[in-house]
Image (spheres, rainbow, N blue to C red):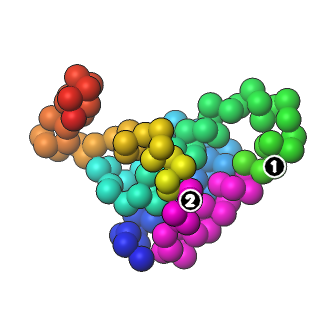
Amino acid sequence: MSGNKEERLLTAELVRKALLGFIPVREALLKFPPDTTDKSIQAAFHALIHLEADEDLRKRDLTYREEQDEYLEMISQILENNEDLPDNIIKNYEKYYKEANIPHAKTAYGNIKSFLRYLNVE
C-alpha cells in the first residue's frame, strides 16, 4: 500500500457520492486530494471523468451503465480498504494520460503549478 489512507478514503467517498448522484461529478472531481501522486487516486479521477463524459451512452445502453457503475463501485471499495488499484487499471489510464489533471492546492506553489499547466509547460 503506497497511498495516503485519508486521501484514499476521501476519494472513495467522492466516487461513491458521484456515482449515486448525491453530488455532481464535477464537484467530486474538484474535491479530489490536491497534488496527489497516488496512482490509484489518479486512476479513480480518470474513471470518474468517464462517468460524466459517457452520460449519453449511459442513457442509451443499460448494460454499459451497469458495468460502469460496478467498475466505479469496485474502485471505491478498493480505495476504501486502502489498497492499490490493480496495475492493469492504472496502466490503462497511463497509456493516455501522463498524470491526472487533479486540481492543485490553493497555495502560492499550487497557483504556480496551475498556471504552468495552463501554459502546458508543467
Q: Position of residue 1 (x, y in %)?
A: 42, 77
Q: Position of residue 26 (x, y in %)?
A: 52, 36
- N-terminal of the pair, mark 1 or mark 2, is 1
| Real-space Cα separation, disc 1 to disc 2, in angstroms | 21 Å
Please tell me how crowded label 1 is: few (under 14), some (14-19), or many (20+) other residues with Cα within 10 Å: few
Q: Quadrant of residue 80?
A: bottom right
- Kindly state the secondary structure of the residue where label 2 is placed: helix
Would you say 95 lies left or right of 116 here?
right
Residue 111 seen in render: no
Picture quarter with the C terminus: top left
Q: Is 78 placed above or below 15 here?
A: below
- Residue at the image position 80 percent from the left and 42 percent from the top: 64
Residue toward you, 87 or 7: 87
Q: Which marked residue is nearer to the observer: mark 1 or mark 2? A: 2
Residue 34 - label: none
Q: Is 121 placed above or below 19 here?
A: above
**Residue kind at label 1, given as amino acid type:** Glu
- Residue at the image position 74 percent from the left and 57 percent from the top: 70
Is 110 colored magenta in this rendering?
no
**Residue kind at label 2, given as amino acid type:** Asn
Residue 5 seen in render: yes
Secondary structure that dominates the magenta span: helix
Residue toward you, 107 or 103: 103
Q: Is 109 placed above or below 36 here?
A: above
Instruction: Specify the segment rendered in magenta.
Output: 69-89
Q: Position of residue 9 (x, y in %)?
A: 48, 67
Residue 88 - label: 2
- Residue at the image position 67 percent from the left and 49 percent from the top: 19
- Kindly state the secondary structure of the residue where label 1 is placed: helix
Mark 1 = which residue?
66
Is 76 colored magenta in this rendering?
yes
